[in-house]
Image: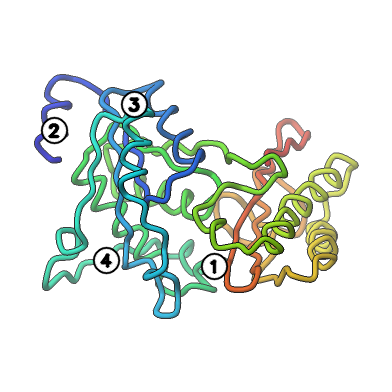
Amino acid sequence: MKQIARLARAEGRISGFVPTMGALHEGHISLVRAARADCRPVIASIFVNPAQFGPNEDLQKYPRTFESDRQRLEDAGVDYLFAPEAAEIYPPGFRTWVNVEGLSERLEGRVRPGHFRGVTTVVLKLLEIVRPGKAYFGRKDAQQARLIQQMASDLHLDTEIVVCPIVREADGLALSSRNAYLSVEERRAAPVLHRALDAVRHSIENGQRDATRLVAAMREVIGSEPLAQVDYVELVNADTLEPVIRLHGSCLVLLAIRFGATRLIDNLLIEEQQGVFRTTL
């Protein structure tokens, strides 16, 4: 992989990189399409990163569909697939970790201690191996994307971090590999995340700017679904991830909801332009 990366750079080509944990869906393929529009070669990785799973999380049952994933990436036009073993990424004696202070401890980091340390460490390692000109991430994992942007900036990485739109099912549910865990009843209930975010969007369009009222409106929608259990619902500054009192600048509505043993996340991006707030689901 390093030889391929060095050759691409020596020839002046901008390579595009799509890191994944496999169990691919259309959201991943949309990242490949974005990379193909800008870059050659396009490189994807499949690596189920043990360092980002907690002791009681789903590492062992995380879906692994390597052969179908490999074919899907090939069909999508990926030039190279990098699929290292865990022992290559974390060899015996490994002891160096990356932590983005101030952004890693909130929201997902509060619920999943150590999760982002595992994410930022493996992403840095993959970027150092692949050395892409651009790396593509989905906005569904908005906090993760923000941490990776900060890490790339802080460490002067020679890779542009590109954050791409969320891809959704027809009923609004954001695509996720973990959607496969949902029972029929839970899958029927899961679009409540989208309905809650859509309610906020309509409230903002109708002039609501108070964060407490917007969060309360989301919780009311989620509370109408008996199978949904709230982990968190927050409205934060998109840069600092700190809670806001009123909408100002760029903000994110972030929520994590459990359906039985399955935990789903989603978000809404709010951007202020000359006093007008625009929302992106």
Q: Mark 4 — residue?
A: 97
| Residue 205 placement, left or right of 190 | right
Front disc: 2 or 1? 2
Residue 6 position within the rendered picture, expressed as x and y whole percent measured from the top left: 12, 32
Q: Mark 2 — residue?
A: 4
Q: Residues within 10 Å of mark 3 (few under 14, many from 20)?
A: some
Q: Are marks 4 and 3 in contact (CB under 8 Å)?
A: no
Say what secondary structure mark 2 lies in. helix
Front disc: 4 or 3? 3
Front position in the image: 146 or 221? 221
Three-letter code, disc 4: Trp
- Say whether disc 1 or disc 4 marks the residue closer to the N-terminus: 4
Q: Mark 1 — residue?
A: 106
Q: Give the answer, above or below, for where 159 lies relative to 217.
A: above
Q: Residues within 10 Å of mark 1 (few under 14, many from 20)?
A: some
Q: Quadrant of residue 31?
A: top left
